[in-house]
Structure formats: C-alpha cells, structure tokens
Image: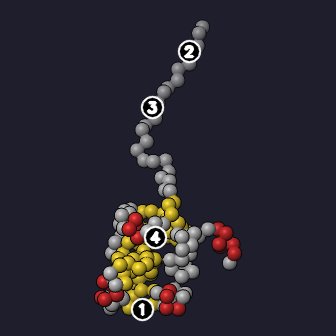
Amino acid sequence: MTAVAAFKTTATPERTVPRGVEATAVTPMGAREQLTQCRGLHLLQTHCQLFGDFICAHDVIEVDFDQRRIKGDAGYMIAFRHSDDYSWYGVRRFQSLPNCELWMADPTIHGDGQAWRMVTPELMANIEVLGMVREVYKPRSKLLRR
C-alpha cells in the first residue's frame, strides 16, 4: 500500500496595506526658500535654536508643511519679514483666545519662550507661515544631562 500525503495549498492573499510605518528620512533643515517648497510631513534636524530652550540645535522636529495658516493653538514654523526681505525664520507658539485675539509666544522678550504678546494685523502682515510643528524630538544625550 502506498500512502500519498495530500497537502492543501492555500494562496496567501495579496497584502493591501504596508507591513509597518514607512521610513522617513531625517533631513537637515534648509534655507527659507527651500522650506517654502516643502509639502506634507517632514522630519527636519535643526541647526540652531528655533524657540528658546524648547527647540535647540540638533533637535528633530516633525513639520506639516500643508498647514500654511494658523488654525489653532500650536507651534508654527514661520518666516518673519523686516522691511523688504525675510530676516529670520523659526518656531513660535500661537494661541487663540475666546475673544478672537491671536497671541504669540516670543522668546526674544525674556529669552524663555514664555512671554506672550498680541499679534496685530501689522505684525501678521510680516509673518509667513511655513508649516505647523507637530512634534519635537530631543536626542537622548540631552535628556540625560538635565
């Protein structure tokens, strides 16, 4: 007697979703002209202090460059214009009050990023919103030093 083993073969269904989160490369932060061309979510490694001690050099920030308007309480990457040219870019935290006033945390006032001032129409005319900062990642070595 000969025994024949029969194996049931089942075809594996084709995968319709990715196996995990797609890898995103961390890129060095470029000039304002490069940042205005970005779209979507990007991870950027900072090269200087962008918002007091909250975002320092070598931190990694996740920026949504599709958010080009201030829509709520969050940190936004902005470029600020003095006279005819943009003089600097960085991150500022904005907050909307119930009376529809918009306020901005400005670390240049006291150096700690906690001083708030009202955003006037004249001030807003000099601000270009590049994107919304979704997350700030600090190197582990910085966290251990504290």
Residue 72 in sight from this viewpoint: no
Q: Whole-percent x and y of residue 60?
A: 53, 67
Amino acid found under the numbered disc labelled 2: Val
Residue projecting furthest to the right: 145
Q: Amino acid at mark 3?
A: Ala
Given residues 125 and 113, the one toward you in this image is 125
Is the residue marked by circle 2 packed among few (<14), some (14-19), or many (20+) residues within 10 Å? few
* SS at mark 3 in the image: loop
Say what secondary structure mark 2 lies in: loop
**Of the residues tagged 2 and 3, which is closer to the observer?**
3
Would you name the residue on which mark 3 appears? 11
Q: Earlier in the sequence, mark 2 or mark 3?
A: 2
Which residue is disc 1 drawn over?
117
Looking at this view, is 57 or 119 the one in front?
Answer: 57
**Where residue 2 sits: x, y (%)?**
59, 9
Q: Earlier in the sequence, mark 2 or mark 1?
A: 2
Among numbered discs 4 and 3, the one appearing first in the sequence? 3
Between label 2 and label 1, give the one nearer the viewer: 1
Element assignment for label 4: strand
Which numbered disc covers residue 47?
A: none
Viewer-closest of 26 and 95: 26
Eyeballing the image, is 8 above or below 96?
A: above
Nearer mark to the viewer, of 2 and 4: 4
* Quadrant location, the N terminus: top right
Q: Quadrant of residue 89?
A: bottom left
Does 107 sit above or below residue 1? below
Tell whether label 1 touches label 3 (CB within 8 Å). no
Q: CA distance from mark 2 to mark 1?
A: 83 Å
Task: Identify residue for label 4.
Answer: 134
Question: Alpha-carbon distance for marks 1 and 4?
Answer: 22 Å
Residue 4 is marked as 2
